[in-house]
């Protein structure tokens, strides 16, 4: 986690020899193993300290009831290094929390991986040449000979520097991280066309607001006072914590033409509202580039969907020219964990523009976290969800899984089905309807979202309970109207498909009932929980229910989704169906 005041780049030299061995303390909560896994006792009094420390440089892999399993990976350590953490800091955290000595190979690997960050640097010379540089001539010689890297190089300048092709700033970073060498990009940026943009203050006629401390720190961590190390990277904050406000703060610091890429048109419209309400921009400054409208203005809001549109698979992406239409000084990637592969490819071509990624979780289901690191930038700021909850910035939340048996009549169909059909049969378990009814009776006055994957299942539930339904086929204006009615309390129940996973502002929703999900998607779990995390006016808690079919693929995938909730510190309790009916 990037803490306030740490966004200045710290270049403390790494030690060349490992630290001294600390004495074991059997009262500590974790065990570091030689295969880079870290075991953490969940019931230990210092569990929360361990979880928050590990979140800075390790990844959660498994979260059974009593022992959680983390792993040190090159990428997790490089993110820590980019945030200013060195190997001594990582080892100190592990030593303070470990029962036993840190294995010697782990000590060495932590130094080796963290030292790799910054060994290769991209620079731009006064004559405009893009240079790959290292203090180690042997390293330059090694990477220059790799076929995956060599194709992007122009010519060696001396034993420590080699020229990179002008168009290959992003490609060279992608290629090098794949072979284990993250590049520190110090080549700078084009300033972009100027745009006077300020955040509203109390003296303005319209509604004013004040940035929270952590939002200001996130802006600072991204911008780094204009130093070459800044101007790129990802801000990780939970839904409802104000990632959009961080982006507005970055725009106000940089004061340049900005392209904002969003998950869908509903999110695009919400960005427009935030810009008009919280900045000095007027309607005339803001353009919409979507399936409905093609406006290009100083601040242009576009969707990933329109950017990746093409008439057929073999055709060009006809809207990619948007990236070159204006003098963009900043490109904002909202929900960066959803960034489509074609946009990755084009982002590799526009590395001279500042890039800000926003997300609630860096987990990508396609495993392309290293491309986010290379092309958008490293994780610049990350705040634990539970810390924001304790400070009152997001609602307190309880996560409850309810396990339901598969009806006897469906057991044979499930047994002989292929894997995909097995998951659908388990997800569409008809007995989930009974539990929905029971939960609705327990929450008569709450704002309840019923969320699922399969449209057929959602239509049946919406019809049975006479609730409004939003799916991908719901017209945009109808969606906006239903969201508005839900926000103002006219509707207390709303059934939604995965189109509501992203960037939907429903501040008073306080109960979510998840009836089916996208296999084991951790990022979807983050987004769905985020729908109910905005602080409530009455200070009440939020409850996130997951209805799971026992002893099926539905349960197996739920274990993976649970990882995210556990990683953020939420207590995930499992209940039998009889407890709900009682």
Image (spheres, rainbow, N blue to C red):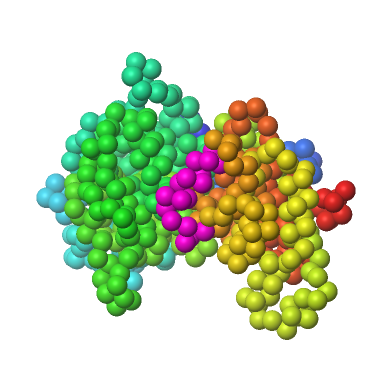
Is 300 drawn above or below residue 317 in the view shown?
Answer: above
Is 66 drawn above or below residue 425 in the view shown?
Answer: above
Looking at the image, which residue sits at the far left? 127
Q: Residue at x 74, y 70 (%)?
A: 552
Along the line of sight, which residue is nearer the eye, 170 or 15? 170
Looking at the image, which residue sits at the far bottom? 416
Is 223 drawn above or below residue 54 in the view shown?
Answer: above
Residue 213 lies left or right of residue 540; in this view the side is left
What kind of secondary structure does the magenta stretch mostly adopt?
helix
Residue 442 lies in quadrant: top right
Instruction: Tell me if I can see residue 166 in this picture.
Output: yes
Residue 484: say if magenta. Answer: yes
Q: Residue at x 26, y 61 (%)?
A: 320
Along the line of sight, which residue is nearer the eye, 110 or 244? 244
The image shows residue 334 at horizontal and vertical percentages of 41, 48
The image shows residue 7 at horizontal and vertical percentages of 42, 35
The image shows residue 46 at horizontal and vertical percentages of 73, 38
The image shows residue 537 at horizontal and vertical percentages of 60, 28
Residue 425: say if magenta. Answer: no
Q: Residue at x 30, y 69 (%)?
A: 310
Residue 293 lies left or right of residue 83; in this view the side is left
Q: Residue at x 32, y 52 (%)?
A: 302
Along the line of sight, which residue is nearer the eye, 6 or 337? 337
Is 442 drawn above or below residue 433 in the view shown?
Answer: above
Instruction: Tell me if I can see residue 100 in this picture.
Output: no
Q: Which residues are magenta?
A: 471-487
């Amino acid at each position: 986690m990037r803490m306030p005041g740490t966004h200045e780049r710290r270049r403390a030299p790494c030690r060349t020899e490992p630290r001294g061995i600390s004495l074991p303390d059997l009262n500590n909560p974790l065990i570091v193993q030689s295969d880079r896994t870290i075991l953490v006792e969940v019931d230990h009094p210092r569990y929360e300290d361990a979880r928050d420390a590990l979140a800075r440089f390790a990844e959660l892999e498994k979260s059974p009831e009593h022992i959680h399993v983390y792993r040190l990976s090159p990428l997790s350590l490089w993110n820590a290094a980019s945030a200013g953490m060195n190997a001594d800091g990582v080892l100190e955290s592990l030593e303070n929390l470990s029962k036993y000595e840190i294995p010697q190979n782990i000590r060495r690997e932590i130094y080796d991986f963290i030292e790799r960050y910054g060994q290769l640097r991209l620079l731009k010379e006064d004559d405009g040449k893009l240079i790959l540089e290292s203090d180690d001539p042997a390293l330059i010689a090694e990477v220059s000979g790799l076929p995956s890297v060599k194709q992007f190089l122009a010519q060696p300048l001396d034993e420590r520097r080699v020229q990179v092709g002008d168009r290959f700033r992003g490609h060279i970073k992608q290629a090098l991280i794949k072979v284990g060498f993250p590049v520190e990009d110090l080549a700078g940026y084009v300033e972009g066309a100027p745009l006077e943009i300020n955040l509203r203050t109390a003296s303005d006629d319209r509604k004013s607001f004040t940035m929270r401390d952590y939002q200001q720190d996130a802006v600072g961590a991204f911008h780094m006072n204009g130093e070459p190390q800044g101007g790129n990277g990802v801000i990780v904050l939970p839904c409802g914590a104000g990632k959009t406000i961080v982006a507005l703060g970055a725009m106000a610091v940089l004061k340049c033409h900005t392209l904002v890429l969003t998950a869908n048109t509903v999110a695009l419209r919400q960005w427009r509202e935030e810009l008009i309400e919280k900045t000095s921009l007027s309607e005339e400054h803001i353009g919409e580039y979507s399936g409905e409208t093609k406006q290009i203005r100083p601040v242009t809001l576009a969707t990933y969907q329109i950017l990746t549109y093409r008439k057929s698979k073999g055709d060009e992406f006809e809207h990619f020219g948007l990236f070159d239409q204006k003098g963009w000084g900043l490109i904002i990637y909202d929900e960066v964990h959803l960034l489509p592969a074609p946009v990755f490819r084009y982002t590799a071509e526009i590395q001279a523009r500042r890039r800000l990624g926003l997300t609630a979780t860096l987990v990508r289901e396609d495993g392309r976290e290293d491309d986010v690191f290379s092309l958008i930038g490293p994780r610049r700021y990350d705040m634990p969800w539970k810390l924001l909850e304790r400070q009152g910035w997001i609602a307190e939340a309880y996560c409850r899984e309810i396990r339901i048996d598969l009806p006897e009549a469906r057991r044979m169909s499930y047994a002989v089905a292929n894997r995909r059909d097995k998951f659908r049969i388990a997800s569409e378990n008809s007995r989930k309807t009974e539990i929905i009814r029971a939960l609705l009776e327990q929450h008569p006055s709450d704002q309840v979202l019923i969320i699922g994957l399969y449209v057929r299942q959602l239509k049946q539930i919406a019809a049975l309970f006479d609730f409004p339904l939003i799916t991908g086929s719901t017209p945009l204006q109808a969606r906006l109207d239903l969201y508005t009615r839900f926000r103002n309390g006219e509707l207390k129940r709303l059934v939604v498909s995965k189109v509501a996973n992203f960037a939907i502002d429903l501040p008073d929703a306080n109960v979510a009932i998840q009836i089916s999900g996208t296999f084991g998607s951790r990022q979807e779990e983050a987004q769905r929980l985020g729908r109910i995390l905005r602080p409530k006016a009455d200070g009440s808690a939020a409850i996130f229910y997951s209805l799971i079919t026992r002893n099926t693929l539905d349960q197996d995938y739920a274990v993976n989704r649970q990882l995210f909730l556990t990683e953020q510190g939420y207590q995930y309790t499992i209940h039998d169906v009889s407890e709900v009916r009682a």
